Amino acid sequence: MMRQLSSIMAEQMSELALILDPGEAEAIALAEEVSCRFLLIDERKGRAVAKRRGVPVAGLAGVLLAAKKNGIIDEVMPVVKCLGEIGYRMSQSLITEIARLAGESRS
């Protein structure tokens, strides 16, 4: 479903686009307009801006951990490894924390 931003949100998106990439700016503006439960965003600056604006955020790590908790996937770390192999960047400290929270080893 495609949704057009209201003129007010379009104006806010324009302001956000001055400090964020256009896609992140639009995602935050749309999340505000539709009062979403959370915005899936991993980029640090975008997450910080969204949080300051009162938009609840989640990242890929949180989605993977929730998927394991809900029985959708058995293990998180093989997915994290595959993501790294295709160029998705995560800090070593984040990878270590994901493994800890998932109760899995980093191997």
Image (spheres, helix red, strand yellow):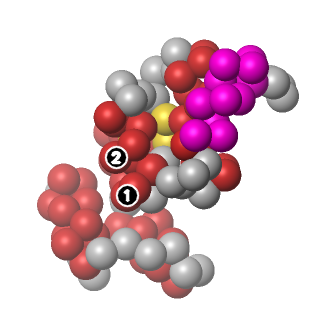
Type of amino acid under label 2 = Ala
Rendered location of residue 62, percent (x, y): 35, 46
Residue name at image x 81 percent, y 24 percent? 4
Main SS of the magenta part reads: helix
Type of amino acid under label 1 = Arg
Rendered location of residue 33, percent (x, y): 60, 18
Residue 70 is left or right of residue 107, and the answer is right
Identify the disc placed on residue 90: none
**Label 1 secondary element:** helix
Residue name at image x 19 percent, y 53 percent? 101
Q: Is residue 78 above or below residue 33?
A: below
Looking at the rendering, which quadrant does residue 102 occupy?
Answer: bottom left
Rendered location of residue 77, percent (x, y): 35, 67
**Mark 2 Cα shell of 10 Å, populated few (<14), some (14-19), many (≥20):** few
Q: Quadrant of the C terminus?
A: bottom left
Asked whether the viewer can see residue 78, the reply is: no
Q: Is residue 10 magenta?
A: yes
Magenta-tinted stretch: 5-15
Separation of marks 2 and 1 at Cα, in angstroms: 6 Å
Q: Quadrant of the N terminus?
A: top right
Q: Is residue 25 above or below residue 95?
A: above
Q: Is residue 18 magenta?
A: no
Q: Which residue is mark 1?
A: 44
Q: Which residue is mark 2?
A: 48
Residue name at image x 45 percent, y 50 percent? 46
Q: Is residue 83 above or below residue 72?
A: below
Question: Mark 2 and 1 residues: CB-CB less than 8 Å, in contact?
Answer: yes
Residue 50 is left or right of residue 103, and the answer is right
Residue name at image x 67 percent, y 19 percent? 8
